[in-house]
Amino acid sequence: MHQASQGRSCEPGVPDSLKAFGAVVKSFRNRAGLTQEELAPLVQYSTPTVASIEQGRRFPPREFVERAEEVLDAFGTLRGAARYLSRQKGLANWFKQWAQFEAEAITLSTYECRLIPGLLQTEAYARTLFANQLPPLDDDQIEAQWAARAERQRLLRERPNTAFSFILEEHLFLRRTGGAEVTRGLLDHVLGLAALRNVEVQVMPVAREAHAGLDGPVQLLETPENRWFAYSEGQRSGLFVSDSKEISVLQMRYARMRSQALSLEDSVSLLQRMRGAV
């Protein structure tokens, strides 16, 4: 388990180092006479992932670097360049690691009781949160924050074989963050995502007197190698969890919450009724 200070502004950005690394990969790929579609199976990643890495939009997993180094006969260049990669100056190391795992996860489960998770937020909802942060953000910081968050949201559609599960407290919608219009847009957006085959959204009703998640928000993910990690976030800190015993406890709690929340069908029905009442 690792704990590190982390402000809510810590979203993965798209720095020049990632773009430079992507350009190097593209150069060696072209040198080898391969298309992105031809390279993808050789490095055991999808074509969209290869494209995202080459465009500097995705942090390259360690396995990608090693396989690309061998396949493209890159003379150690890719390994060397990868050592200098960073997502954003000052970004906590534990979040860099989490974001890298998140980008390649085959299962991602999220319980939230404070705000709508970043992967499900609309631009209007997210900008409302940014505008109310303390210390205040300037315009450039808000634009950077939204750009990074929107980039992460691509995972929901770019990784159709990843199973995304979300358990959201009903009161997150009842608060009407940003006002009625923002809430209507948010409900429409979440309902649209809930219709995707790889996305499940369950609502924990306010009428539920107690449930297994009262200790706070949590995220769990499974890597392609079937390793599990978790993290939970507080006001000014985040906790990255890699200990198997701790993860077992969190998995047990999340499984119980899935049984305590409304079913998928009932959750969608409730969100639709809430949409009509806004």
Image (spheres, rainbow, N blue to C red):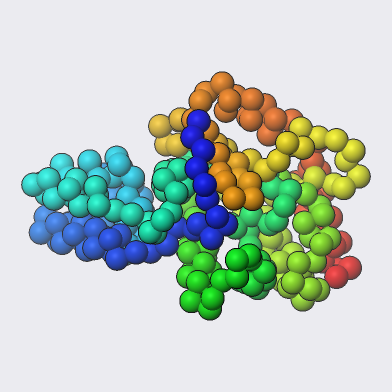
Quadrant location, the C terminus: bottom right
Q: From this viewpoint, which residue is outermost toward the top?
A: 245
User: At which x and y percent is residue 178?
Assistant: 74, 72
In the rendered image, residue 248, in percent from the top left (x then y), is placed at: 60, 24
Task: Identify the residue shown where x is 80% and y is 45%.
Answer: 204
Does 51 appear above or below 146?
Answer: above
Q: Give me the residue at 77% from left, 56% from top.
A: 172
Q: Is residue 204 above or below residue 32?
A: above
Q: Is residue 206 left or right of residue 17?
A: right
**249 to the left or right of 228:** right
Horizontal and vertical percent for residue 183?
76, 69
Q: Residue at x 70, y 56 (%)?
A: 115
Report the number of numbered marks: 0
Residue nearer the viewer, 31 or 140 = 140
Extreme-bottom residue of the structure:
139
User: Which residue is pictured at 47% across the width and 52% down the height?
Assistant: 159
Give the quadrant of residue 42.
Answer: top left
Residue 137 visible in the displayed image: yes
User: Quadrant location of residue 233?
Assistant: top right
- Res 88 quadrant in image: bottom left
- Could you tell me if residue 35 is visible in this image? no
Please determine whether, in this image, residue 102 is positioned above or below residue 117: above
Residue 214 location (% of width, % of height): 77, 37
